[in-house]
Image: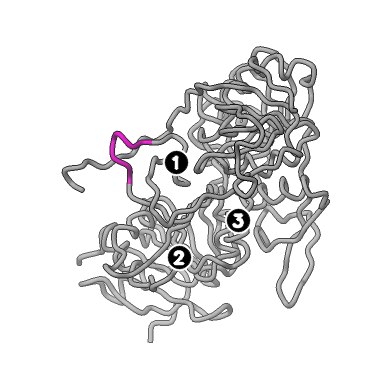
Amino acid sequence: MMPWDRNQIAARAAKELQDGYYVNLGIGIPTLVANNIPDGMTVTLQSENGMLGIGPFPYEDEVDADLINAGKQTISALPSSTFFSSADSFAMIRGGHIDLTILGALEVSEEGDLANWMIPGKMIKGMGGAMDLVAGVKQVIVTMDHVSKDGSPKIRKQCGLPLTGKSVVDMVITDLCVLQRPSAGELFRLTELADGVTLDEILAKTEADIVTG
Amino acid sequence: MKPVYENAQQALADIIHDDMTLMVGGFGLCGIPEALIDALETLGAKGLTCISNNAGIDGVGLGKLLRTRQIKKMISSYVGENKEFERQYLAGELELEFNPQGTLAERCRAGGAGIPAFFTKTGVGTIIAEGKPTEVFEGQTYVMERWLRADVSLIKGWKVDEAGNLLFRKTARNFNQPMATAGDICVVEVEEVVATGTFDPDQVHLPGIFVDRIVLNPDPEKRIEFRTTRSRENG
């Protein structure tokens, strides 16, 4: 069995990009998608702290404390970049102007609910922009490991953790497979398996009902 | 002409008191009003409610006022990377109201624009919407969120002219722009004060009508949270 590694998950997610897309990438595996944008394709990355057109990390002598991404990392600007306020940034997000967001998850439910911001009693960091992104962006892709560190399923009948959004996830890309939800009210369909991964393994590691045919 | 203060304490001394509500601009440590936060620490007002996207990190930004126990309540979207915050919150010493980041920005914008409430899809079906009115518009459910206003907003700008017209710099604009409109008194900390007429009116980010007091801090520290770079060899 050869599950996909983080870069392979990101490369698979990058296949969903289209020329001219405006995209918001979360922290972790989603950030790696930026390294996999096909040559010749124009994809504009949005950073919810107030920037369109995220450039690469700066050279050491070009580091600017006033130029960071939403992960608070120093970045650079491109000739096409623009800056704006948080209110304008979330008008883009909530107004449906962003084509695609890719983010991580703690749990996804069979109906496309997403939990990724809180573990009661443990993690109290806050949701940041995640609730706005899943509510407002046209297409929501989750990238994550198929099961949690203790081996329990992360794709569940219902989320046990507090939700980030209800019926918001369109596609899940894990280290084992790709699941797509054609529309609200439908179950996820298994559309791809990582090399060497079997259907039986997916079914054993997935609590949610999914369509496999 | 807006009053220009060389000293942040002087700019705040007669308007800061215990138990007041403040808006503090910035995203992480980017675009925070450093001199104004330092002045709050020196002035020592307690029981503060701070509306700010983040709570600084340990001992930096609003983390300074957490250390001195001057903050009673935070209204924020993300408070990670802050051990003292976590300790005070888990010990029940600090109140916390989480807002989705876009809801927080829009609540500030609404406060400044005189709009007492608005409807949004963000948070519908989550604990954020519990106890709040919902309404269906064109087949979709939206939750009502209320405006935010503050007694004083503390804002970080880049350059301001003597009429208060202000420019922000790069991603340091963030929450500073909407928060500047939503405080009864708006104090801006800037790196440079220039003569009125210097800016092209088409390029002003925040018209001077929103600015009440100016504090000059030509050399802020601008701490970087995560310094990420590439090398020239690897392109």
- Badge 3 and badge 2 in a common chain: yes
Q: Which residue lies at the image location 78% right of the left edge and 63% below the top edge?
A: B134
Neighbours of disc 2 within 10 Å: few (<14), some (14-19), many (20+): many
- Which mark is on residue A156? none
Judge depth for marks 2 and 1 and give the one in front. Answer: 1
Residue marked by disc 1: A67
Element assignment for label 3: helix
Whether residues under marks 2 and 1 lie with C-beta atoms below 8 angstroms apart, the answer is: no
Residue B174 drawn above or below residue A91: above
User: Magenta residues?
Assistant: A57-63
Circle 3: residue type: Phe
Judge depth for marks 3 and 1 and give the one in front. Answer: 1
Neighbours of disc 1 within 10 Å: few (<14), some (14-19), many (20+): many
- Which mark is on residue A90? 3
Q: Is residue B15 visible?
A: yes
Image location (x, y in percent) of residue B93: 67, 26
Q: Is residue A58 magenta?
A: yes
Q: Which residue lies at the image location 62% right of the left edge and 16% below the top edge?
A: B68
Q: Is residue A104 visible?
A: no
- Badge 2 and badge 1 in a common chain: yes
Sequence-earlier tag: 3 or 1: 1
Element assignment for label 1: loop
Residue marked by disc 2: A155
Q: Which residue lies at the image location 47% right of the left edge and 37% below the top edge?
A: A66
Distance from label 3 to label 1 (Cα)? 18 Å
Residue B227 horizontal side relative to residue B6, left or right: left
In this view, which residue lies farthest toward the left?
B233
Residue B215 drawn above or below residue A143: above
Circle 2: residue type: Ile
Distance from label 2 to label 1 (Cα)? 37 Å
